[in-house]
């Protein structure tokens, strides 16, 4: 038993060390990107542009936090982008058509996201549908429901100016509230992942689900909870994007899941499960935003931006594979 315990501790120490290295590499990559674009582009190094980077990061950053929980368990959620859209439509209907106050509309968006995530979790944990298939199907369902509920028309928050000011107001240094909300959400997610039973079992599921089950843990319950958290964060991301656009756009959302997954992977979350951190995911989201904005300012066309972003994601996964092989 002592030998096993010692080996386990050694492995955990190795994993933690590897995670730290990955986060440092991601942080270093972000610093290099910022320095590179600042040197080659005068418009990039303006104060307004530096503020625009965290603003552009907010939605994807929050989405990626929820995805991080799922990927650490060894799963995937392809529905987060359209779930986000569905939540914005739900909030729009509650506030504009039902005439209910914003303090009810916002929780409604979060509840809608958590509900979608719970359904995903039930399909995966109870019905034993592979995460890829279950969430792919849910991506289509939530996209369709968003269009049905909105009649494929934008829902504008014209009668609730406080909604825009709540998220996009600039009370401190000209930085919108959405940025502070993103960092607040990151702190909460990090505490949940590192200091709670949910966090411990999230890592346990990704490291060895069968061993966790044999130890007496109700793995289905914790897996459902993880997907519910992912949906909750998709709902929060929905409120952020709705505030930025001052509307619920039923056609927005497709493709956001790829950026969210990319942010988590670039930040060191292993697609094999068992490893990841919220700090790394936030850095990954900043890398994507910095790369996108920097390439746009320097005149790179959209199609080439997609190619470059894809190469960055492939490179991040390849580095993760090399790191894991070196440890084993």
Image: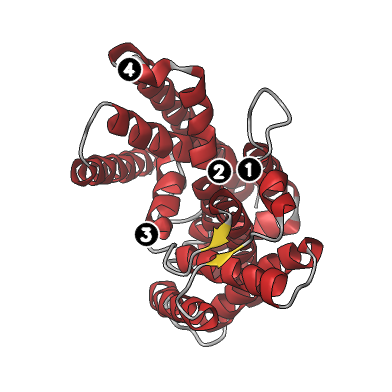
Mark 1 and mark 2: span between their CA atoms? Answer: 6 Å
Label 4: few (<14), some or many (≥20) within 10 Å? Answer: few
Q: Earlier in the sequence, mark 2 or mark 3?
A: 2
Mark 1 and mark 4: span between their CA atoms? Answer: 25 Å
Q: Residue shown at 71%/69% (left/top)?
A: 95
Q: Earlier in the sequence, mark 4 or mark 3?
A: 4
Residue holding disc 3:
255
Q: Earlier in the sequence, mark 1 or mark 4?
A: 4
Label 3: few (<14), some or many (≥20) within 10 Å? Answer: few
Secondary element type, mark 1: helix
- Left or right, 315 with reference to 112: left
Q: Which mark is residue 36?
A: 4
Where is residue 94? Give x, y as percent.
70, 73
Mark 1 and mark 3: span between their CA atoms? Answer: 20 Å
Task: Examine the rendered structure and indicate whether residue 39 appears above or below residue 116.
Answer: above
Which residue is at the far bottom? 127
Please say if the residues under marks 4 and 3 sit with CB atoms less than 8 Å apart: no
Mark 2 and mark 4: span between their CA atoms? Answer: 22 Å
Please say if the residues under marks 1 and 2 sit with CB atoms less than 8 Å apart: yes
Q: Residue shown at 23%/30% (left/top)?
A: 299
- Left or right, 12 with reference to 198: left
Quarter residue 120 falls in: bottom right
Of residues 210 and 179, the one drawn nearer to the viewer in this rendering: 179
Secondary element type, mark 3: loop
Where is residue 322? Give x, y as percent.
30, 40
Q: Earlier in the sequence, mark 1 or mark 3?
A: 1
Residue holding disc 2:
58
Q: Earlier in the sequence, mark 1 or mark 2?
A: 2
Is residue 216 visible in the rendered image? The answer is no
Where is residue 113? Give x, y as percent.
62, 69
Secondary element type, mark 2: helix
Secondary element type, mark 4: helix
């Amino acid at each position: 038993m002592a030998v096993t315990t010692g080996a386990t501790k050694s492995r955990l120490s190795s994993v933690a060390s590897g995670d730290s290295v990955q986060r440092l590499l991601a942080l270093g990559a972000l610093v290099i990107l910022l320095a590179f674009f600042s040197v080659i582009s005068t418009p990039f190094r303006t104060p307004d542009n530096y503020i625009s980077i965290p603003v552009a990061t907010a939605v994807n950053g929050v989405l990626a936090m929820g995805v991080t929980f799922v990927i650490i368990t060894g799963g995937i959620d392809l529905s987060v982008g359209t779930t986000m859209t569905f939540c914005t439509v739900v909030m729009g209907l509650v506030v504009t058509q039902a005439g209910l106050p914003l303090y009810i509309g916002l929780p409604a968006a979060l509840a809608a996201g958590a509900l979608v995530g719970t359904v995903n979790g039930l399909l995966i944990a109870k019905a034993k549908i592979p995460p890829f298939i279950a969430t792919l199907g849910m991506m289509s369902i939530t996209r369709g429901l968003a269009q049905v509920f909105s009649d494929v028309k934008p829902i504008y928050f014209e009668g609730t100016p406080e909604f825009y000011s709540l998220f996009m107001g600039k009370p401190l240094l000209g930085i919108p509230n959405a940025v502070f909300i993103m960092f607040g959400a990151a702190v909460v997610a990090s505490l949940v992942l590192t200091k709670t039973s949910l966090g411990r079992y999230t890592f346990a599921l990704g490291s060895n689900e069968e061993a966790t089950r044999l130890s007496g843990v109700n793995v289905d319950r914790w897996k459902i909870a993880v997907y519910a958290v992912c949906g909750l964060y998709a709902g929060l991301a929905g409120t952020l994007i709705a505030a930025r656009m001052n509307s619920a756009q039923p056609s927005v959302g497709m493709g956001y899941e790829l950026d969210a997954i990319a942010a988590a992977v670039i930040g060191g979350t292993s697609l094999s499960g068992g490893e990841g951190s919220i700090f790394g995911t936030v850095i990954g989201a900043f890398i994507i935003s910095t790369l996108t904005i920097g390439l746009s300012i320097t005149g790179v066309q959209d199609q080439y931006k997609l190619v470059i972003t894809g190469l960055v994601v492939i490179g991040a996964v390849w580095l993760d594979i090399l790191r894991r092989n070196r440890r084993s």
